[in-house]
Amino acid sequence: MNKIHNFSAGPCILPQEVYEKSAEAVLNFNGSELSLLEISHRSKDFVAVMDEARAIVKRLMKLGDEYEVLYLGGGASLQFLMVPFNLLKADGGKAAYLDTGTWAAGAIKEAKYLGDVDVVGSSKKDNYAYIPTDYIVGSGYDYFHCTSNNTIYGTQMKEFPEVDTLMACDMSSDIFSRKIDFSKFDLIYAGAQKNMGPAGVTLVVVKKSILGKTGRTIPSYLNYQLHIEKESMLNTPPVFPVYASLLTLQQLEKNGGIAAAEQRNIAKAQLLYDEIDRNPYFETFCRNEDRSLMNVSFKITDESRKSAFDEAWKAAGISGLNGHRSLGGYRASLYNAMPIESVQVLVDVMKNFA
């Protein structure tokens, strides 16, 4: 088969070795003559998978036993509701949210069903072209929520505020892509399909001591404490996505961990941004200082030549480059598994086009 350069924003590409080992497990898992898709989630083999999948997250993030790792269903969108259910006090609770894009706005919408929400900073009026900095998270909030990377608009938080409350973060599209002091956060969640596995499972990392303090009756599936007690098996877990996520994280660990991934991601992003800045036919949507390492959103400056450019990148074997329907233009997603050689193919197309 000819090489396809897949810049899709999600589900993402994964390392080739993950595809191969996952395919093998679908046919014959651990030499059992049973498919991974049919084994019991209570079997010794899969319990070992779940245990290591949880343990490797804490190793990569350098977190201790005060944190618990969960693999849940429902995507990051369900976490928009689970976070306030577990952190927002039932009586007089209030949360602070930073509005930096569509998914941050979705989290704000869900939290408002359960209590008072203050949007302490927003770039919505400027079409989310930057990360707000002129905001203060005052005292009196049950927690502060932010979104580290905004896939649609191509912006990324480079720093996180110091707050006098709990901090929760949606890291769906840049988790494990750069060095962060993860201990600054009390709760982190991420849909796996952007950077760590296939669609169908959501990672939650939560400090156990913050739970059970809202005075709120929480539906069972939305209660982090119950998931912790059942070791991510309150219900049948998404067996295949958990296994593929474990394989992806093992590859990451083997290849130098998060620090090495960050250097590769910086090189890929710099290669593409340099071409955009050099080439008069292209420009980004966002401010330079907030450019994402994961999602490079850009547009063509001469719309009359759009069809010609589309023909050129498709002829080069590039896929998934169209921008989000709400913004238009183009979006090149440079997740951990994206090789720099594929980025070079796109850059060469842009150079030849000019």
Image (cartoon, helix red, strand yellow):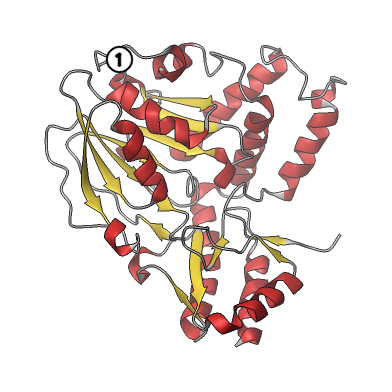
* Residue at the outermost left position: 139
Specify whether residue 58 is in view.
no
Quadrant in the rendering for residue 18? top right
Q: Amino acid at mark 1?
A: Gly
The residue pinned by badge 1 equals: 212
Q: Residue at x 53, y 26 (%)?
A: 72
Residue 28 image point, x, y percent: 85, 27
* 10 Å crowding of disc 1: few (<14), some (14-19), many (20+): some
* Lateral position of residue 41 relative to residue 257, left or right: right
Which is more toward the observer, 104 or 147? 104
Give me the residue at 75% from left, 61% from top. Answer: 4
- Judging depth in this view, the residue of 96 and 169 nearest the camera is 96
Image spot of residue 101 (x, y percent): 37, 52
| Secondary structure found at label 1 | loop
For the point 61% across and 38% down, the residue is 199
Q: Residue 103 location in percent, x, y?
A: 41, 45
Q: Is residue 268 visible?
A: yes
Query: 21 left or right of 287?
Result: right
